[in-house]
Image (spheres, rainbow, N blue to C red):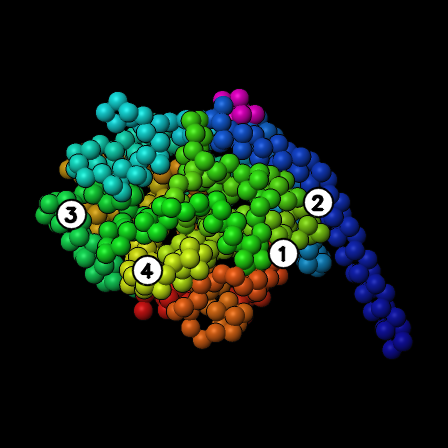
Amino acid sequence: MRRLILLMSLALLAMGQVQADVESELQQFIDQHVAILQPLSDQANLAYWDGATTGKPEAFAQRKAVELQISTLYTDTEAFARLQQWRQSGRVQAPLLKRQMDKLFFAYQKGQIPQDLMERMVSLDNKVQEAYTNYRPEVDGQVMTMSDIYTAMTTETDLAKREKVWRASKEVGNLIFDDLIELVKLRNQAARLAGYDNYHTMSVACSEQDVTQIDEILTQLIELTEQPFIDMKRLLDEVLARQYGIAIEALRPWHYHDPFFQRTPLVYELDLDTVYQDSDIEALMKRYYASVGLPINDILDRSDLYERAGKYPHAFSFEADREGDVRVLCNLQNTERWAETALHELGHAVYSKYHDRTEPWLLREPAHAFTTEAVAMFFGRLSRNPAWMQKMLNLSDERTQELAEVSGTYLRFQQILFARWAAVMYFFEKQLYADPDQDLNTLWWDMVERYQKVTRPEDKADAGWASKLHFATAPCYYHNYMLGELLASQFHHTIVHDVLKTTSDQTLSLSHDPRIGAYFKAKVFAPGARYHWNEMIERATGEPLNPKYFVEQFIQ
C-alpha cells in the first residue's frame, strides 16, 4: 500500500511538472507574440486615426502596410499547431493563461490562409475604407457632408429634393460595390481554407458565439415586435403622409428621417432636437460623465469632435495603445442625434479607459464586442430620458412633463425599430456570404419590406445598401448591436434594482450618482476580457445574457 501511495504521489508530481512546463512554454509564446504585436497594433491604430481625421492617402497606405504585417503574424502554421496542441492537452489550467490561449487560438485559426490572399484582402479593405472616407455626394451641384444629409432628411419639405438627397446618400454603395463583392469572396475563400463553409460562419464562431443562438434570438425578437412595430409604424406613416400631403401608400424610403430608417423620425408632438439646440454637447458630456464618477476630460482633450473637410463623416470610439490613450471621433452638432451619439461613443471610451492596466495586454479589451456596445447603448439611451434631460439641461417640471409624454414613445419605438433593422442587416449579411453572386440588390429590398415595412422605390434596385460601411469595415458584426441592446437592458435592470436599490426607473435620471460609475468600473470595465463574455455578464448581473429585460422594458 505504501508503495502504491508513493507511486501515485510521484505520478501526481510528474503530472504537475508537465502542467507547469506546458504553462511555462505557453507563457513564453504569449510574451513573444505580444512583443511583436503590441507595437504593430499601436502603429496601425494611429495610422487609422490619422486617415480618419484627415483622409490623407499616405495614412491609409501606412495602415495597410502595418495591418499586413499583423495579418501575416497569424498565418504562422507552426504557431497555430502549437496552440492547438496546448489547447487539446487540457494541461493549461491557470485561468489567465487559458483565456489568452483561447483568444490567440481563434485569431490564428482565422489567419491560416496564404500570404497572397491575405495581401489582397488587406489591400481591398483599405481601398474601400479610403473611398468611403473621402467620398462626398452632390445634390444639385452642392457637395454634402453626412451631417448635411441628416439635416436635409430631417427638415427638407421639398419632396423631390428629399429623394435626391436620399439617393445621393447611397451613391457610394454603387461606387464600392465591385470591390466589396470581391472582398466578400476573398473572405469566403479564407474561411474555407480555415475549415468553415463561409466567412460569416467563421467570424461568428471565432468571436465565441453561436450562429444558431443568434438566429433564435433575432427570430424571437422579430416575432415579439411584429405587431407593436406595425401599430407604431402605422401611426408614424399617418403623421408623415399628412405632413407631406401624400397618401400613406405613396411613402417611400426618402420620406423617413434616416437614410436606412434605423432611427425614429422626431415628428410627434415634440421635436427632441429643440431640447438640445441651445446646448453645448461637448460640455454636456463632460458634466454628465463626471456626475457618475467617470470623468472624460482627458478623453475629450485627445479627441476630434467637430466636422471639417476630409474627415470621416460619422463617429467612433478609439483606443490607441491599451495603455489609456482613448479618444472619440465625432462631428458634433446640437441635436438629439448627436447627443445620443456622443453619449454612446463615450460609453465605449470609458469602457476602454478603465480597463485594469495590470491585466495581461491581450486581455485589456472588452469581454466581447457586444459588451462594449451594451455599455454604449446604456448611456446612449439617456438622450431620450426626460428625467435625465431635466437634470442635465435644467428643464422646468412643466417642460419635463411635456417631454415625458413623447420621449417614452420615441424611445420604445426606437428600440423596436432597431430590432427590425438589425434583423435586416444580420439576415442579409448571412445571405451575402452564403451566395455573393445572387441578386443582392433585390434581396436587400425584400428584407427591408419584410422587416421594416418600407416600400422599395419603383426603379431597378441598385447597390445603395453597400453604402452601409459596416459591410466592408465591420463584417458580420451587426448582430452585436442587437445583443448589446439586450445586455444594456440587463445592465439597466441591475443598476436600478441592485445598485441604486429602487423599485422603479420612472423618475430616475441615472445621473449625479457615482455608484453607477463604480459599478461599471468594478464589474465590467476593469476585468476586460479576463472572462468569457457570458461569465462576465453573470458575474456583473447575477445571470447569463437574458433577453427578457429588453422585452420587459420595451415590448411588453
Q: Residues within 10 Å of mark 3 (few under 14, many from 20)?
A: few
Residue 399, which numbered label? Answer: 4
Mark 2 touches mark 1? (CB < 8 Å): no
- Describe the element under mark 1 as helix, strand or loop: loop
Quarter of the figure with residue 140: top left
As drawn, the residue found furthest toward the bottom would be 1
Give the structural element (helix, strand or loop) at label 4.
Answer: helix
Q: Circle 3 is placed at which residue position? A: 243
**Which label was assigned to residue 469?**
none
At 56% from the left and 54% from the top, the residue drawn is 290
Residue 60 sits above or below residue 276 on the image: above
SS label for mark 2 = helix
Q: Depth-wise, is mark 3 or mark 1 nearer the camera?
A: 3
Q: Earlier in the sequence, mark 2 or mark 1?
A: 2
Report if residue 58 lies within the magenta region. Answer: yes
Quadrant of the drawing holding the N terminus: bottom right
